[in-house]
Structures are given as structure tokens and as C-alpha cells.
Image (cartoon, helix red, strand yellow):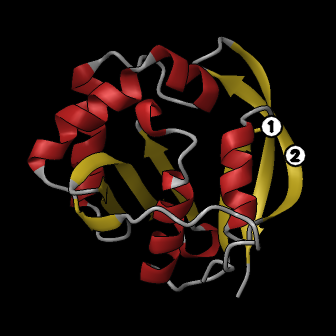
């Protein structure tokens, strides 16, 4: 469970998680094709505008019995997705919130809801070191930095520093 907000922090926005539906995918594709969002995320697919690759990826996600993926709703509208994937020893969290909703606490609220839904620990995460929004989301939800890495970021076309995170108990 994520810690309570720090005194003086704004009230948490309300989000709901539900199963991913076919009708969510065009929205996810639009969110995940936004050039600025892709640049900030850094570690994305080779071609975020390739709809066939996107559809194949989501078909694999939805067919897997080891991946937990949910649609994030705010005020009844789809604003992104959040999930947990990976082998049992290395389960990682992932989330994507539409850039139009950045800065309002929705990613933090979505990750908190996901962590309540998926109680297994430890969980891991990675974020581009300069992605201050994701770094803040992860630390607000109790993840701690455990190391660094450097890898090729498709969205930037260059080697990019990453922070590695872990959430225990």
C-alpha cells in the first residue's frame, strides 16, 4: 500500500481501475503516440506510430495470465493504463497517463490503486532519470531508488540514464 499523502499535499484525485476493453485501445494508441509523451517516457517501442505493432503488443498483454493490466478512469473517462508484468522474481509496474492529464496526481492515484489490487512484493520499476514526473510518482508510492542503468531509448534515439526502483512489503 502506498503511504498517505504528506501534510500540505493536495487532495488525491479519484481514479478507478477496470479491465481493459477493446474500445480503450484506440485511446491508448493516441496517448502512447503523443511525441512529447514518448520523448519523456524515453523507453518505448521502436515506432510508437506503428498501429499493427501496437495491436500485436496489446493482444499479447490481454492474452497473458501473468500480466495484470487495467484501464485508468478519472471522472468516468479513460485517461490511461497501469499494470504489473514480468517473471515472479522480477515483477515490474508500468503506467501511462494521457499527457493532457499530467501534473494532476492521476498517475500517483492510479499506481496507488494498482498496488492495492496487486499485493505481491517486491515490485520493481524503471524510469528515465530525467523523467521527474515518473520519479516523483514512484517515490510518492513508496518505491526507493536501488541503482542506475543506461540503455538505448528508442524515443530519443540515444543512450539514456535510468533509475531503478524497488517496493518492498
| Residue 55 x/y as whole percent | 22, 34
| Residue 20 x/y as whole percent | 21, 57
Name the image quarter holding residue 31: top left
The one of 157 and 104 positioned closer to us in this rendering: 104
Q: Residues within 10 Å of mark 1 (few under 14, many from 20)?
A: some
Residue 83 horizontal side relative to residue 93, left or right: left
Give the residue pinned by disc 2: 148
Residue 130 horizontal side relative to residue 2, left or right: right
First in sequence: mark 2 vs mark 1:
1
Question: Tag 2's secondary structure?
Answer: strand
| Residue 30 x/y as whole percent | 29, 26
List the single residue furthest toward the left: 23
* Residue drawn at point x = 21 percent, y = 57 percent: 76
Residue 164 horizontal side relative to residue 126, left or right: right
Residue 1's place in the image compared with 151, above or below, is below
* Residue drawn at point x = 52 percent, y = 25 percent: 37
Question: Tag 1's secondary structure?
Answer: loop
List the single residue furthest toward the top: 157
Name the image quarter holding residue 19: bottom left
Marks 2/1 in contact by CB < 8 Å: the verdict is yes
Residue 13's place in the image compared with 115, above or below, is above
The one of 77 and 168 positioned closer to us in this rendering: 77
Q: Quadrant of the N terminus?
A: bottom right
The one of 134 and 148 positioned closer to us in this rendering: 134
Residue 118's place in the image compared with 163, above or below, is below
* Residue drawn at point x = 80 percent, y = 37 percent: 129
Q: Is residue 69 visible?
A: yes
Give the residue pinned by disc 1: 129
List the single residue furthest toward the front: 8
- Viewer-nearest of discs 2 and 1: 1
Amino acid at each position: 500500500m502506498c503511504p498517505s499523502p504528506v501534510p500540505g499535499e493536495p487532495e488525491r484525485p479519484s481514479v478507478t481501475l477496470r479491465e481493459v476493453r477493446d474500445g480503450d485501445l484506440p485511446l491508448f494508441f493516441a496517448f502512447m503516440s503523443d511525441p512529447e509523451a514518448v520523448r519523456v517516457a524515453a523507453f518505448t517501442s521502436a515506432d510508437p506510430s506503428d498501429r499493427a505493432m501496437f495491436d500485436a503488443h496489446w493482444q499479447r498483454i490481454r492474452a497473458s495470465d501473468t500480466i495484470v493490466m487495467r484501464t485508468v478512469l478519472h471522472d468516468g473517462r479513460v485517461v490511461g493504463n497501469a499494470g504489473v508484468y514480468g517473471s515472479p522474481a522480477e515483477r515490474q509496474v508500468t503506467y501511462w497517463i494521457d499527457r493532457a492529464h499530467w501534473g494532476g496526481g492521476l498517475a500517483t492515484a492510479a499506481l496507488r490503486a494498482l498496488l492495492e489490487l496487486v499485493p505481491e512484493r517486491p515490485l520493481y520499476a524503471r524510469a528515465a532519470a530525467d523523467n521527474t514526473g515518473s520519479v516523483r510518482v514512484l517515490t510518492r508510492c513508496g518505491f526507493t531508488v536501488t541503482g542506475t542503468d543506461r540503455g538505448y531509448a528508442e524515443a530519443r534515439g540515444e543512450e539514456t540514464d535510468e533509475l531503478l526502483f524497488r517496493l518492498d512489503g
